[in-house]
Each structure stands twice: as structure tokens, then as C-alpha cells.
Image (cartoon, grey):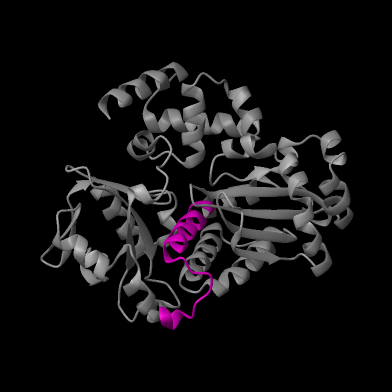
Amino acid sequence: MNVHPPLQLTSHLVGMIYDCVLEPVKWEAFVSELLRELDFSYGLLSISAFPEGNAIFGVSVGIEGPWLERLPGYWADIMEIWGGDARIQQYPLEEPILQSQIADGRRLKANPYYSGWFAPQGYIDAVAIGLERNPHMVSSLALGRHASAGPVGESELGLLRLLAPHLRRAISIAQQLELQSIAASAYASVVERLPVGVLLVDELMTIIHANPTAESLLSQPSPFRSAGNRLAVRAGGAEALEQAIAKAASDEAALGRSGGAGIPVRHADGAAYVVHVLPLRQRQSRGALCLPASAALFLVPAGSQSPLPSEPVTQLYGLSPAETRIFELIVNGETPKAIAKQLGLSANTVKTHVRNIFAKTGTRRQADFARMAASLRVLL
């Protein structure tokens, strides 16, 4: 991997990710840069409709024409390598999964995709990251490593873990925009026509602009209102949203897993929304919106997308998607060894996640997880 100060490299790549939201034609440049920085040979970023499987958006970098044309014919074999649909559904979102950790050599050599496509090109390993799975779409990023670059190391996986939440947020916002490619200059008019509310705010939560849907939400009973032209959130989730906006204004790379792919906001009257925060302060194409905003907030009715897994625990304790999934499995009685095998993670990775869960939740034993989960079910 090329030598860069970690924070500088992370900030650079995060900035490219959010530029892609406003200008989707830049996704190819981002994937190319990611491959160069991490010494991968090919990258596939895909968004597909669910359950039909039709491609909504896709970027392929580093795969030559004939090989790319042959790739769809191996779809069933690729699924088999990764454990089949049921197992793939178990992999935590945002967690890089190594092909070499979930499939042994004997099974790989017997697989037509591996023997007919992967190995002949000199690839030795691959990383897959699930970015979104909901009733409407699935999205993932896959990266291939050539033998000349050597094994995939923890440094590469660590950077991918930092980038994954930003990728997931960008994909979630792109889903609301329902855009494949559009000139940046057209975004202002697109935002005005969106069926979801969009607010442009500065770092003090001053409302700079609201599209018609957002104006309607502000004028009627909802979790959101305008108080002296500042956004006020009359519901749970207000503090998390304020923190996310502050990070968007000062250091977008620090957004990380703040709010995951969205911040749940619930009002006492039962109204529920998920707020996606798109940082704008450092966007090269911010001029497309013609406004000095720090962030764009997409106010999405919660019923229009799948609920976040174990949402109370995730939000109360700030667990990552991988930590949340492992928490769920431990509460259901699975051992760390079984979890590692089921999720295709190394035993050390699972132990690290468990230690993080202990630290974040203030617990000391796995049995404490079950009692905590039971109490949350009663309270919530």
C-alpha cells in the first residue's frame, strides 16, 4: 500500500465518496483511487433492485472487457463461494469479509468461478463489503487482490472499515435521490421535486433552504420544526443529529459510524423518520446547490426503509453494524467461535468486537448482554 499519513488518506477518500453523491459520474474515479491506494487489482461497486436483482447502478474498474463479459455467468458459483444467500444475509454490513477466511482451498479449487475466472488472472484473494440490504435494494463493494501484491493485511482492512460507513451513507442518500448519473448543475431542481424532505443547514442548524416536502413537515405536527429559522427536533435522536451536523461542518471524516446509514428520530405522537446527513462544506460541487450550507438532511419516513438492526442497542451504545450483529448472535446463544465461522471472520476479529461491545455497554460477561437485551425489550 502506498505510504500516506492515515488521517490525510482517510480524509481524501471520504471526500471523494461524498463528491460522488452530488456527481455520480465520479464513482469510477473513487474506485480507481481506492484500488491504487490499497494495491487491489479490480473493484466492483454495485447497487441492485431487490428482489428482482436488476442492476440499478454499477461501477467496474480493473477488469478487462472479455473477463467482465464472462463474469455474470459465474453468479451462482460466486454465491456458493461466499456461502449462499442465507449465509450472506448474516454477514454484518460495513464489515470487510475476506474470501480466504470463509472458503478453504479445496472448496475454492473445485469452484468453476475460482478455477475458470479468478485464479487464471492471478488473483489470490478478494474482499467483499455489504453496504445495504433492505426490501428495495442491495449494495456491495468487492475488491480483488493479485498475487503480485501479496496477501491482504490488517492495514487495508482497517482503512476499509473506516470508509465503509461513509460508503453506506452515500449509497443510502443516492437511493433517496434515485439517480444514476446527473449533471451537478441539475441537483437544485431535482431536490425541489423529491418526495422526501430535504433541509440545507449550517453548523448551527440554521435552515438555509427547505424543499417543498420539508416545508410541509415543518408546518405540521412532526418531529421537526423551525424555531427562529433554526431546526429544532422534538424527538429522540436530536442529540445524535446535532453531533452529526457539527462533524459534517468541521471534519466530515469524523462522521464515521455516527448514525450509521441514518439517524432514527421518533416523536411522542408516533411519527418516525430516518435522517441521512450529507456533508457539503468540503464538496467540490457544492456550488451546484448555490448555497453556503454545511449539510443536507434527507428526512425519510421510517416505514419507507428497513429498520436498523437492534436499533435501541445500536443507538444507545454507539455500536458499529458488525458489533450489533455479533451482539445479536451472542444474545441468541452463539459462542464467539461459532460466530467467527458463521460470519466468515477470524477468531481475533470477533474477540476484538466483543471487547468493544463490553467497553461500550459497560458489561463484563456475555450473560450480561442477554439481561440488557431483555430489559430493553421491556422498556421499548
**Callout count:** 0
Quadrant where the N terminus lies? bottom right
Q: Would residue 344 be visible to someone looking at this image?
A: yes
Residue 202: in sight, yes or no?
A: no
Q: Looking at the picture, how far across and down is residue 109, in whole percent?
A: 87, 40
Q: Residue at x 73, y 49 (%)?
A: 126
Stretch in magenta? 164-186
At horizontal 14% and vertical 54% (from top left) the residue drawn is 221
Q: Nearer the viewer, residue 238 or 180?
A: 180
Residue 363 is situated, as x and y percent measured from the top left of the image, at: 39, 23
- The answer to whether 112 appears left or right of 214 in the picture is right
Spot occupied by residue 122 in the image (x, y as percentages of width and height)? 86, 55
Q: Identify which residue is drawn at 54% across, 40% down.
A: 92
- In depth, the one of 249 and 120 nearer the eye is 120
Left or right of residue 61: residue 308: left
Q: Please say if 374 is above or below 104.
A: above
The answer to whether residue 169 is magenta is yes
Principal secondary structure, stretch drawn in magenta:
helix
Residue found at the far front of this picture: 52
Q: Is residue 203 above or below residue 139?
A: below
Q: Position of residue 225 (x, y in %)?
A: 16, 59
Quarter of the picture containing the C terminus is top left
Q: Is residue 31 magenta?
A: no
Q: Residue furthest top?
A: 367
Q: Is residue 102 left or right of residue 89?
A: right
Residues 248 and 177: in front is: 177
* Residue at (38% x, 65% y) in the render: 279
